[in-house]
Image (tube, coloured by chain):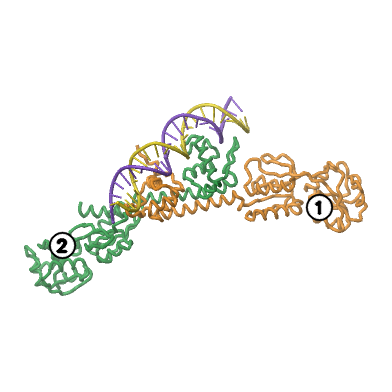
Chain colours: A green, B orange, C yellow, D purple
Amino acid sequence: MSVTSDRRRPNLSTRQLHAFLALAEQRSFTRAAAACHLSQPAFSALIRTLETELDTRLFDRDTRSVQLTPEGRLFEASARQLSDDFGAAVSELGAHVQGRKGRVHVAALPSLAAGWLPAIFAEFRNSSPGIALSLSDLLSDPCIELVRSGKADFALASTGAGHAGLSFELLCTDRFFLVCCKDHPLAGEKILTLKKLVPYPFIHMSRNSSVRQALDAALHPLQTQTLLEVDQLATVTGMVEAGLGISVVPALTLFHFERQSLVTRPLAVPHLTRKIYVVRRQQGSLSVAAQALHDLIVLRMRG
Amino acid sequence: MSVTSDRRRPNLSTRQLHAFLALAEQRSFTRAAAACHLSQPAFSALIRTLETELDTRLFDRDTRSVQLTPEGRLFEASARQLSDDFGAAVSELGAHVQGRKGRVHVAALPSLAAGWLPAIFAEFRNSSPGIALSLSDLLSDPCIELVRSGKADFALASTGAGHAGLSFELLCTDRFFLVCCKDHPLAGEKILTLKKLVPYPFIHMSRNSSVRQALDAALHPLQTQTLLEVDQLATVTGMVEAGLGISVVPALTLFHFERQSLVTRPLAVPHLTRKIYVVRRQQGSLSVAAQALHDLIVLRMRG
DNA sequence: CACACTTACGATATTCGTAAGGATT
DNA sequence: AATCCTTACGAATATCGTAAGTGTG
């Protein structure tokens, strides 16, 4: 029976590589064994098994001198390279595991991306400066699509619809506020119901925005006087500030409306909420970096 | 007590690498175990050990699906590269060990290089086409210097002087021949002694050649009529053929004198010999390729 | 309940360190 | 005699395969 199997896939370990290199440098079993924290006979056996597995004498050992054979010298270059590459791979992996390196791609609704996330990102960047951050500030559906395709690690979106393969975890329930000019009749109202709002001209977000969808659902069957539909919250700010109309937006967007001439007032409409979900793929864990950012987001929102 | 030592130098084996890659491809412990010729639990333990040593979960294993974690995907690229590099290094080494690849640098006296070695080299090249051959055709001293400096694997030279660190193994004892024109008075002599030669004009090799040194030693105290001293045997051929004089050369150089107009006759001078040695460094073995060529040279000369 | 991974466990192999052996200076 | 590598050997450790356990569709 032939024993060619050993030749085909010798089982080498990094310890053997390290031992080989130590011996090549020290040219002494005794010193190299000490450098490897091994007894000298154990070290000797380590080298012997390496030579057996490679089916070659790597060292000429005269009692008085130890030196590489020509084949050993050939292997030395490979061994050094391999050892370095191993070290680099392990240390790269370690950096990712420890959160010192990595990349996180978050998809989030524009309203969150502009107002609430910046502080979170700043805090995360401060504690994990080695993590590269990407943020896609898009509407719910494109956000979710980025997660599904694997381009984003997770999303902060508002659709609760059951997408197969995705998991939706409720992050928070966003209550709505009236936004109007300081001198608007509604600015002094104690209790703001939807019925009190509808007589006034409205600046709306476009229909595919999460803000608008939550609002429309709550208004039904009331009708508003829609003065304008816009895509960006910043535009709403400008329009309302110019006195063209009022608007209704979730708490997390109030960042856009902190201005002298404007007033923001909570609505007394319990069922008018926008739910924000953390959306991620159902199977497959997050990277260490993504998990850390996820945890921070959840902590700052709920903790 | 902290246990950071495992993190610093994890002991990985090529089997673990191979197992990892098999599982990453097959996405099934059962199939990957089969591919590695292991029982499934043993394979499972192999992966667990790898994850422990790297201090990371590399696979998300739901009972129903197995897939890489983000960190696992990161490591996959490194693992594939490392596995390939290992294979390349081992196979390169194997090729050298089996004599399918390699390089041999021989230093040899010009007289051997031109006449006797070509057939040897041809035979060696035929049986070992992957071995790159170098030949330095120099006088003894430069040949030996190439060996001492490690530039040549071994030399075929004639100095028996004791150089420290070099070993001299007698390869053959070269007897001398008269070379003269077919119509020269000596061409018909039955028994050729040195005394019969000295009256005639001599074409000599230069004093630092091995041929000349052996000859001078044997002549003493006889004196020859030195017509000319030249460096190359081929020049001797031309001079003798032109009828300018006679010469005395070792058997291994007779290749130069196989010509219609010339006669070569053995000398009856037992102590006139040139000894050819195989010179190599005392410690340190020859490469597989060099050893093979060495063995062939010894075999063809002595066998 | 069928399938796939994990845990349990006894048997086998490997690897360790101590101690003795052999060769060279 | 001193030094350095190898061999011998009992002990500790690791790894294997079989079989039982666990969780999910």
Label disc, if present, on residue A57 of the rendered structure: none
From the viewer's side, name the closer residue of A199 and B41.
Answer: B41
> Residue at position x 46%, y 52% from top?
B82
* Image: A224 above or below A147: below
Label disc, if present, on residue A273 of the rendered structure: 2
Amino acid at the residue labelled 1: Leu
**Left or right of A136: which side holds A78?**
right
**Left or right of A48: which side holds A205?**
left
Chain hosting mark 2: A
Q: How many marks?
A: 2
Within-10-Å neighbours for mark 2: few <14, some 14–19, many 20+: many
Residue B63 in percent (x, y) is at: 32, 52
> Residue at position x 10%, y 72% from top?
A200
Would residue B35 be visible to someone looking at this image? yes
Within-10-Å neighbours for mark 1: few <14, some 14–19, many 20+: many
Residue B57 in percent (x, y) is at: 35, 49
Label disc, if present, on residue B254 of the rendered structure: 1
Compute the Cα span from label 1 to label 2: 108 Å
* Image: A149 above or below C25: below
